[in-house]
Amino acid sequence: MRKKLDRGIFVWDREFTGAVVRLALPVLLQALVASFMFIVDNLMIGQLGQSALAGVTQANRITFFMQVTMFGVVSGASVFTAQYWGARDLPGIHKTLGLGMLTAGCVALPFALAAIFIPEQMMRVLIQSGGADDALAAGVEYLRVVGFAYLIQAMSMVQSAVLKSTEQVKLPMYGSFAAILTNMTFNALLIFGKLGFPRLGVTGGAIATVMGCAVELLLLVVGGYKMNFANAAKLADLVSGTREDARRFFRVVLPTMVNEAAWSLGMVMYSIAYGMMGEGTVASISILNNIEQLVSIALRGATHACAVMIGMAIGAGRNKEAELIARRMLVLGVGLGLLTGLVAMLVGPTVIALFPVPPETAAATHTLINTYVGFTWVQALASLLIVGILRAGGDVKYAMIVDILPVWLVGIPMVFLAGPGLSWPIHWVFLLTRIEEVIKDVICIRRLRSGKWIHNLVAKEG
């Protein structure tokens, strides 16, 4: 790519395209299967009734909060790992892996203890509308068991992030496939009591999730050591970091943790607002989440490819190449966003028909999906700018501020005012959440053009 920096961002480049496909395709396939499993999971739970679907959907907001907070840890670790990989510094990667696993455990443990021991108190925050006792009970039943998966998921996320950031994307894909297959199999057996297994309902779904997570972690660790990948570190290498290494690590990881925790808490606040609007609204949002999971898989692959390519370029001291990659990926992001909207429009009616919800809920969901379709490209740009470019470039504090403030100062106040306050229809309430995405895009593009987002975090050791 260095020989082609004089070429424009719209000119096809075989080397660039090959790198994007090589890094993005396994992640895309992994996300595709995971999204399919997410839909199947919800379909199985949905067969137990709208209350069960609403309760498990809200319980998964806690899981979502934990996972996105954990994403802050692994995202920060990924920034270091990609730059160390660009500098070909394997000891630096091992120190990052050790610090990442320690931090991940400390973050996930409180979530696990709360989910296991005080699930009812947590669910009462998320389900506050009258007449939702059945949904509340289902959520408590599910959360109490799925909390056992949180520490396992935390370790898997760190292992997977290190592998992906060192261009080993196939093993995480296989690990995810195995986890999903395990989850699907035991969902069918334990939710409905097939082949002589007990019929456990939502508890069975939670047990299947724990089993799938354990299988994934086992494959990542065993496979990494067997193939001598970058995550195959000796214990002494994992704990070899100095105080200065830890300080440098946490200067990046803490802002990304705060970023993701505050952002995901904002998403939970949206969920609280939706929960106050009734079970029908929660069911509509749940169906939209299924569609969003399915159609945004290409964006996830592109964001990962963008972050790794930019991190490697900066770690190797090729800043101009990083700038070119960023601009080309934004062009790709707009196209992917528009394609995502088209796919959502096409699959929306089919997905809605799969869920046994009342006609009024189905009609509201259809309108909600059409609203979502018009802003998919805005969401795509925000993801690429914040995660794939600014954060990968080491500009973590700026990315944190831009990602958090629009949610809390603009999105949340408007959603609570319009939804629980003024009883607007769900599609109008959802539309207000897109305004904060537009604000992020405008601010981040200005930062990108300034060039101030590039920070070589491993230069002293590169």
Image (cartoon, helix red, strand yellow):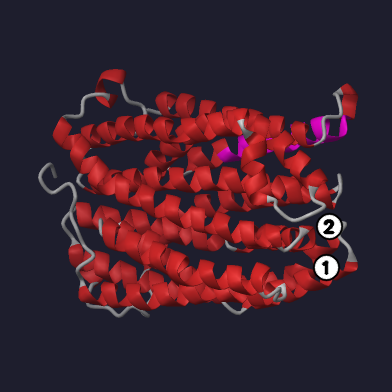
Rendered image: mark on residue 355: 2
The kind of secondary structure the magenta stretch mainly shows is helix
Image point 44% across, 50% down: which residue?
A: 261
Q: Amino acid at mark 2?
A: Phe
Nearest the viewer among 101 and 413 is: 413
Q: Residue at x 33, y 78 (%)?
A: 9
Q: Is residue 153 left or right of residue 82?
A: right
Q: Nearer the viewer, residue 249 or 238?
A: 249
Image: 370 above or below 186: below
Secondary structure at numbered mark 2: loop
Which amino acid type is shown beneath numbered disc 1?
Answer: Ala
Residue 158, above or below 281:
above
Which stretch did the figure color magenta? 176-193
Q: SS for tag 1?
A: helix
Q: Answer whether labels 2 and 1 touch (C-beta < 8 Å).
A: yes
Image coordinates for residue 40, horizontal then vertical, percent: 75, 48
- Residue 362, label in figure: 1
Q: Residues within 10 Å of mark 2 (few under 14, many from 20)?
A: many
Q: Position of residue 304 (x, y in %)?
A: 42, 55
Query: Was residue 407 drawn as part of the magenta stretch in this picture?
Result: no
Which part of the image, by quadrant, shows the C terminus? top left
Side of 245 where 46 appears, left or right: right
The picture quadrant where one finds residue 183 is top right
Q: Residues within 10 Å of mark 1 (few under 14, many from 20)?
A: many
